[in-house]
Image (tube, grey):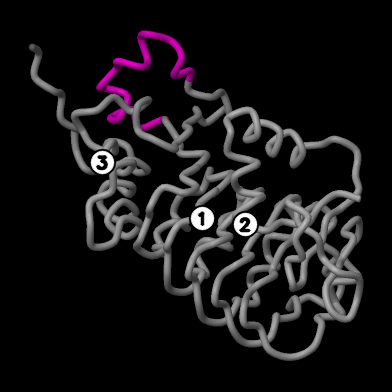
Amino acid sequence: MAAALPLASPTSNPDVALLLTKVKPALQGQRPNAQLATWNASTPLCLWRGLRWAMPDGRPLRCNAASSSRNLSLASDPALLLVSIRLPAAALAGHLPPDFGAFFALDSVYLAANALSGPVPLELVNVSSLSALDLAGNRLDGDLPTSIWNLCDRVTELRLHGNALTGAVPAPAGPNTTCDRLSVLDLGANRFSGGFPAFLTAFRGLGVCGPPLRQCVTASGLSSHGVAGDGHRPHGRGQRQRGGQAEEGEGEERREKGGGAHRG
């Protein structure tokens, strides 16, 4: 049997190096994790669980091709960029590292229904390419950073339901923030203090619910008991992404466990 090819150097692919040295240890916590165990130099990159990659021009890495699925050298290709992390219900028991902010091509993060603890790192919500963030059903705590609304100009869905976030829901730093692209927002079942964040009603295209407004209802028909919203828009980028997850069997699981609001 041919020997496994090692990574050429820690910097041959910056995203790969960052996953192995920073992100993997942070997410798994104190015990080894079966999903994250696939992230190693002796496993072809296409078999690393929960990850999607692309070229700088946006072309996705085609892992369904036999030549790619067995290619150990892809992990050393400096051109490949990490564009998605999807590990819902994967028994992750660590924390969210600030190193997420270094993935400048990262488009989506789906880590719902795990046991991740600690704060939502500022670096994650400042990723300029991020369009979907689902951290529902974890053990995240601390205040929600004001910079969370920096995602407004690009993010289509933001799910933080079912954590232990505290403090008041912060208002956007900019007075005219309308979050035009945001179509799904769920902040329910946390430990926020203060009254209803009235500024959310100015977010265009987002039907906001929660006390003292109408009751929030999840896809399972249960009240989310908190601030949530769901836009009523034509099919677009956000809808295609959610549809893609449903095809993989992850979308429904996330809605049931994460408690997202439903479309009216």
Q: Is residue 142 left or right of residue 33?
A: right
Q: CA distance from mark 1 to mark 2?
A: 7 Å
Q: Position of residue 191 (x, y in %)?
A: 62, 82
Q: Amino acid at mark 2?
A: Gly
Q: Earlier in the sequence, mark 3 or mark 2?
A: 3
Badge 3 marks a residue whose secondary structure is helix
Within-10-Å neighbours for mark 3: few <14, some 14–19, many 20+: few
Q: Position of residue 82 (x, y in %)?
A: 46, 39
Furthest-bottom residue in this view: 194
Residue where numbered disc 1 is placed: 113
Q: Earlier in the sequence, mark 3 or mark 1?
A: 3
Q: CA distance from mark 3 to mark 2?
A: 25 Å
Furthest-top residue in this view: 66
Residue where numbered disc 3 is placed: 37
Q: CA distance from mark 3 to mark 1?
A: 19 Å
Q: How many marks?
A: 3
Please tell me in which quadrant of the rendered image residue 242 appears: top right
Viewer-nearest of discs 3 and 2? 2
- In the picture shown, does residue 193 fall above or below 247? below
Residue where numbered disc 2 is placed: 258
Q: Which residues are magenta?
A: 62-79
Depth order, front residue of 189/111:
189
Q: Amino acid at mark 3?
A: Ala
Q: Amino acid at mark 1?
A: Ala
- In the picture shown, does residue 101 fall above or below 16? below
Q: Are marks 1 and 2 in contact (CB under 8 Å)?
A: yes
Q: Position of residue 122 (x, y in %)?
A: 52, 70
Badge 1 marks a residue whose secondary structure is loop
Q: Earlier in the sequence, mark 1 or mark 2?
A: 1
